Amino acid sequence: TIVLYFLLVTYAIICLESVNEVIIMRKVTALLLAALVLVGANTALADKTITLDKDTKLVPQGWTVADDIKFKKNTVVKLNDDGQVIEGVLASATYLRPAGWKSLASNYYYVERSAPFFPPRFFYHPYRPGLVIPADGHVRYMGNKSVTFAKDGTVLSGVIDNDVILQLSDNGYGFVRFKNDNLLTFDADGRVISGTLAEATKLRPLGWQHNLQDESAGFVEFKSGTGITFDANGLVTNGSLSKKTLWHNADGSTKELGAKAPVAFTADGAEQG
């Protein structure tokens, strides 16, 4: 819009000049037409948003088979050029495949069944019968929460409705349990970016190579129930420690990091507060 306004002003100024007036006007007119076409093309390519007046079945982007996925009424949904969902609010809890589904561990879910499904018993049992069923790389995402889909149809971000265990990196062994009722995000390659720890976990932050002075091997314990972020290699970039820790920076200096408060880690050192 600003570019178009500038061109219009330029056009008006040139029209007032007498030297080669006709030639100049033709060139500027052609320039204006090209600008209008460009603006129109950019508008056409822009993602669309709609507000739903009722719970509505829509298809996420990247899906080749439509399913009954409902998005919540009175919320805004972002669509691509093909009318498929990029981002929207789920109407109810829904099983979807996260971008990092190949890193999922113990991917099963529990379904309660009625008592008649099982053989009759002659004594009381204080449990609800049920079945454990493979989830095939799917995770239950909370209803009334926003989800964002990657171009391949997997979920880049959403609030998980059950704990999720993920292998942290393809380059080594190790699993992290992420807490339910919290946002879990991935990059387009399926690497976990951020989540909330379901239990205290020992991990390596950026700059761990400068912290090999004891038997810890560069690992520090991060507090259960706190948010954490990772780089592409599975190293912690931000998290809250379980206890006070003396951290060694790349320049040889040290810093005492407090417990239960977020710490930002870089290859050069750590900062808190």
Image: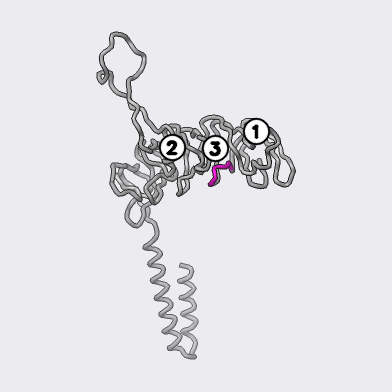
Which residue is at the front of the view, 17 or 235?
Answer: 235
Residue position marked by numbered label 1 in the rendering: 216
Say which element carries label 1.
loop
Label 2 to label 3, Cα distance in Å? 19 Å
Residue position marked by numbered label 3 in the rendering: 227
Q: Amino acid at mark 3?
A: Gly
Q: Amino acid at mark 1?
A: Ser
Q: Nearer the viewer, mark 2 or mark 3?
A: 2
Examine the structure image and report whether residue 9 is included in the region drawn in magenta.
no
Say which element carries label 2.
loop
Asked if disc 3 and disc 1 are in contact, CB closer than 8 Å, the reply is no
Residue shown at 47% from the left, 43% from the top: 185
Q: Position of residue 244 (x, y in %)?
A: 67, 32
Label 3 to label 1, Cα distance in Å? 22 Å
Q: Position of residue 228 (x, y in %)?
A: 55, 39
The residue lying furthest to the bottom in this view is 19
Say which element carries label 3.
strand
Q: Amino acid at mark 2?
A: Leu
Q: Nearer the viewer, mark 3 or mark 1?
A: 1
Residue position marked by numbered label 2 in the rendering: 104
Compared to residue 18, the image places residue 167 above or below, namely above
User: Magenta part of the protein: which range?
Assistant: 232-236
The residue lying furthest to the front in this view is 172
Compared to residue 241, the image places residue 268 above or below, namely below
